[in-house]
Image (cartoon, grey):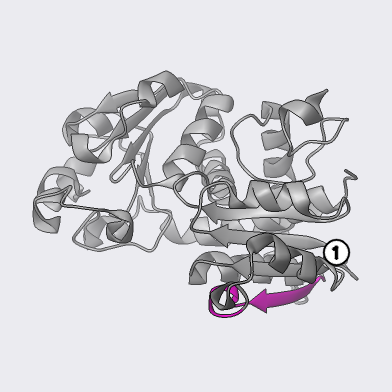
Amino acid sequence: MLYKRNPQLNQHGELIHLLSIEGLPRAVLHHILDTAETFLSVNDREVKKVPLLRGKSVFNLFFENSTRTRTTFEIAAKRLSADVINLDIARSSTAKGESLLDTIANLSAMHADMFVVRHSESGAPYLIAQHCAPHVHVVNAGDGRHAHPTQGLLDMYTIRHYKRDFTNLTVAIVGDIVHSRVARSDIHALTTLGVPEVRVVGPKTLVPGDLKEMGVRVCHDMKEGIRDADVVIMLRLQNERMSGALLPSAGEFFKNFGLTPEKLALAKPDAIVMHPGPINRGVEIDSAVADGKQSVILPQVTFGIAVRMAVMSIIAGNEA
């Protein structure tokens, strides 16, 4: 049974939760990307709404701050005509000592249909999915260092939009890999979609040792890592997750691993530059690159709304 192997899928192999890209079949990823393409035109309408989630209640449960992700989920749900409830959980029930599962039980009693969950603990969305009512769907909006599946999917949508075909690309993911849930989601998505060469690039202190097992090439030299790349995905230094001195300084990091026009010239002439945001100018990326003609950082945000609309509409349409 597919369900026993992957709690995100029902017995028919249909998506009922989005918890991680890891383990999802290629066909499911393509279905999400294809559906997102149909929603992109909604952004251009005078009335930016479709009725697919009319009468449904989507609860944004952000136990960890993220303005960009929460806002795009809220916009996506509202464009699907859902009722959206934003809860500042970190400052309310859990701060008063209520357990995560008690919080979920109480919110389920308010007739929630979908939980969008951002949590600092890896695995929290899985726990919620295991204990919520059968009709409730869970979307992981980022958990610990584990996964950020909708960011991974919007990154794949962006790559497909500009490069069309995954099967002849070289993609370099550069920066703080060890603390990045985006990097993990991107790696799983890229390898599932058939990208022949995925490189991770960063200092030894910021690249985990098990990545070769995931089918990627590890580079500790920036020039080697982005040479002839079709796509360069930059990641920010996640200082809030670092314990101890993993780097001499931000300036030293920028010197060796910051993306400048000179380094970008080593990639293919038509290479695109991506970043999940927020960007730190002068730390991982030079302003001339972030604002340059090869940057697709702002289109990523636009695509993110369509991708999140796709995810929510697909899982809401499938029964557990």
Residue 27 visible (yes or no): yes
Report crowding for label 1: few under 14, some 14 to 19, many 20 or more residues within 10 A (C-alpha): many
Residue that badge 1 annotates: 53
Q: Residue at x 80, y 44 (%)?
A: 16
Element assignment for label 1: loop
Left or right: 56 with respect to 124?
right
Residue 107: quadrant of the picture:
bottom right
Q: Which residue is drawn at 39% across and 47% down?
A: 180
Task: Inspect the magenta stretch and tell me whether residue 23 lies in it.
Answer: no
The quadrant of the picture occupied by the N terminus is top right
**Of 274 and 189, the residue lying toward us:** 189
- For residue 301, above or below residue 54: above
Residue 291 visible (yes or no): no
- For residue 128, above or below residue 66: above
Residue range in magenta is: 82-92
Q: Could you say where residue 57 lies in the image, as x and y percent from the top left?
A: 82, 70
Q: Could you say where residue 146 lies in the image, as x and y percent from the top left?
A: 49, 44
The disc labelled 1 sits on which kind of residue? Leu
Q: Could you say where residue 142 lies in the image, as x and y percent from the top left?
A: 54, 54
Q: Could you say where residue 38 lies in the image, as x and y percent from the top left?
A: 75, 51
**Of 89 and 10, the residue lying toward us:** 89
Q: Residue at x 53, y 51 (%)?
A: 151
